[in-house]
Image (spheres, grey):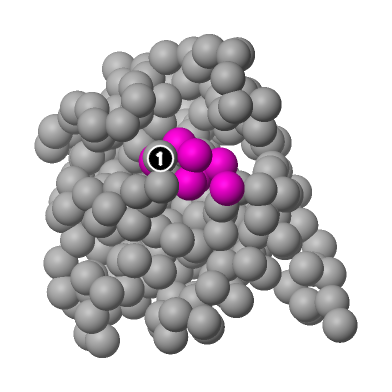
Amino acid sequence: MTNAIEEGVAPRTKGLVIHWAARYDLLAWLLTRGREQAFREHLIGLASLEPGDSVLDIGCGTGTLAIAATRHVGPAGAVYGIDASPPMIARATRKAAKAGAPAVFQLAAAEQLPFADARFDVVLSTLMLHHLPRNVRQQCATEIRRVLKPGGRVFVVDFGRAQSRRGLLAHFHRHGHVAVEDIESVLTNAGFSTIRTGPVGLRDLQFVLARAADDVSATDGVTL
């Protein structure tokens, strides 16, 4: 029987949507050279997740990072994941159930988040931003700012430069890239201040950790 989520209607988005969920997990295994769990734990450490945090993972894919995050925020916290692909959300939901993880996954577009203002303490975005056109990246950042509590944090990871078209990884997925300076600029325009940036220690992946302005009005007047 087909999972009801797989039959769901994908939300409209201007970004690139990946639907091959099983192959996505294989790609992650190849990218991390079989050390995906350690890599996810490293990312969570860089994001500074704390017990009790309410977390949103944008472009969650098959849910591996969100599931790992549930162990760090504990029973007092909450973890949600959104993706525009029904197969990705279906696989993430199955993985969470198998792991006994209380992560909640739902279909949504990065540029139109289905959550109330000031809902989350932390927003995660890993290897997603390069799938969005430049103008949509700014719209996504503004939405992230809206759903974050004042002083909340956003953690973004992406490829720092264009990927080689050779090799097995290129066979599965031709990655784009977003320079760290461009990520910082998008976040600054949305009302964030950078806490720290740097390499994540795998290939040429770079991260930006930024904090939302304490005053929500700081984002007023941002042009999308």
Q: Name the spot of residue 29 as percent of width and height, x first.
A: 48, 46
Residue 139 seen = yes
In the image shown, does 77 or 199 lie closer to the viewer?
Answer: 199
On screen, residue 176 versus residue 146, left or right, reads: right
Identify the magenta region: 26-32
Instruction: Name the residue located 44 percent from the left edge and 80 percent from the top edge.
Output: 99
**Is 171 drawn above or below residue 125 in the view shown?**
above
Answer left or right for 148 relative to 31. Answer: left
Amino acid identity at mark 1: Arg
Give the side of residue 4 with respect to residue 175, left or right: right
Callout 1: 10 Å neighbours few (<14), some, many (20+)?
A: few
Q: Which residue is mark 1?
A: 33
Residue 148 against residue 42 in the figure, above or below: below
Image location (x, y in percent) of residue 13: 70, 43
**Residue 27 colored in magenta in the image:** yes
Q: Give 200 or 212, whichever is nearer the viewer.
A: 200
Q: Is residue 200 left or right of residue 177?
A: left
The one of 213 and 52 positioned closer to us in this rendering: 52
Give the structural element (helix, strand or loop) at label 1: loop
Task: Give the total number of marks visible in the rendering.
Answer: 1
